[in-house]
Image: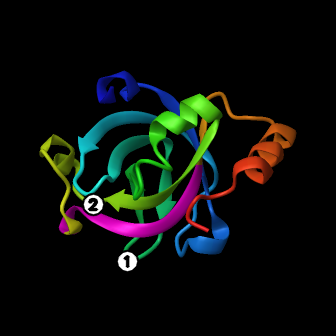
């Protein structure tokens, strides 16, 4: 099932209320899905175009990690089935971490949370309808 997700395109919009670091909404491509313990799902996404982050030093974020804590309720498959999902967003600090079997805490930096939509990006009216209908599962 995870192989089916690789190469799929998504739209990522940071939740400004729950995120210390934000970037403008943008397209992303799934490049890796990790088999994570405790029912979590960790998905590496390449951002197009890369986001710019100022702290701790100015740099471009090429990859982010979407972490779905409760796979039964929220997961990337839900994005393509129902149109949207909600995930924690982590910055991938080391490109080579994608080649490992799993991610450690030293490989990522917490950024916040985001709404994840299937590509193409939904219109504003569709977006509002989806958010009102489902909302984040973690609330």
Farthest residue in the right direction?
Answer: 125
Tell me what residue is drawn at x 82 percent, y 44 percent.
129
Of residues 60 and 70, which is closer to you in this image?
Answer: 70
Give the residue at mark 2. 93
Tell me what residue is drawn at x 66 percent, y 73 percent.
17
Q: Which residues are magenta?
A: 106-115
Give the residue at mark 1. 56
Q: Look at the numbered disc 2 and give the secondary structure of its residue.
A: loop
Farthest residue in the top direction?
Answer: 4
In the picture, residue 37 is in which quadrant? bottom left
Q: Earlier in the sequence, mark 2 or mark 1?
A: 1
Tell me what residue is drawn at x 42 percent, y 56 percent.
70
Tell me what residue is drawn at x 62 percent, y 41 percent.
84
* Residue 82 magenta-highlighted: no
Looking at the picture, how far across and down is residue 50, in whole percent? 47, 47
Q: Is residue 5 left or right of residue 20?
A: left
Q: Is residue 122 among the parts visible in the rendering?
A: yes
* Residue 108 magenta-highlighted: yes
Looking at the picture, how far across and down is residue 117, in whole percent? 61, 40
Looking at the picture, how far across and down is residue 60, in whole percent? 41, 56
Q: Specify the principal SS of the magenta part.
A: strand
In the picture, residue 11 is in which quadrant? top right
Q: Nearer the viewer, mark 2 or mark 1?
A: 2
Of residues 124 and 22, which is closer to you in this image?
Answer: 124
Question: Which image quarter is the C terminus in?
Answer: bottom right
In the picture, residue 22 is in which quadrant? bottom right
- Note whether 131 is above or below 93 in the view shown: above
Q: Is residue 45 left or right of residue 98?
A: right
Q: Is residue 28 among the parts visible in the rendering?
A: no
Question: Which image quarter is the N terminus in?
Answer: top left
- Colour approach in the figure: rainbow
């Amino acid at each position: 099932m995870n192989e089916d997700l690789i190469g799929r395109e998504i739209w990522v919009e940071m939740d400004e209320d729950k995120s210390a670091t934000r970037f403008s909404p943008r397209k992303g491509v799934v490049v890796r899905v990790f088999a994570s313990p405790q029912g979590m799902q960790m998905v590496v996404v390449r951002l197009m175009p890369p986001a710019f982050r100022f702290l701790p030093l100015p740099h471009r974020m090429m990859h982010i990690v979407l972490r779905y804590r409760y796979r039964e309720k929220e997961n990337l498959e839900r994005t393509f089935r129902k149109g949207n999902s909600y995930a924690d967003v982590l910055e991938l600090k080391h490109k080579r971490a994608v080649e490992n079997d799993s991610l450690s805490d030293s490989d990522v930096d917490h950024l916040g949370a985001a709404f994840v939509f299937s590509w193409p990006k939904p219109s504003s009216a569709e977006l509002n309808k989806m958010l009102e209908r489902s909302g984040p599962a973690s609330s």
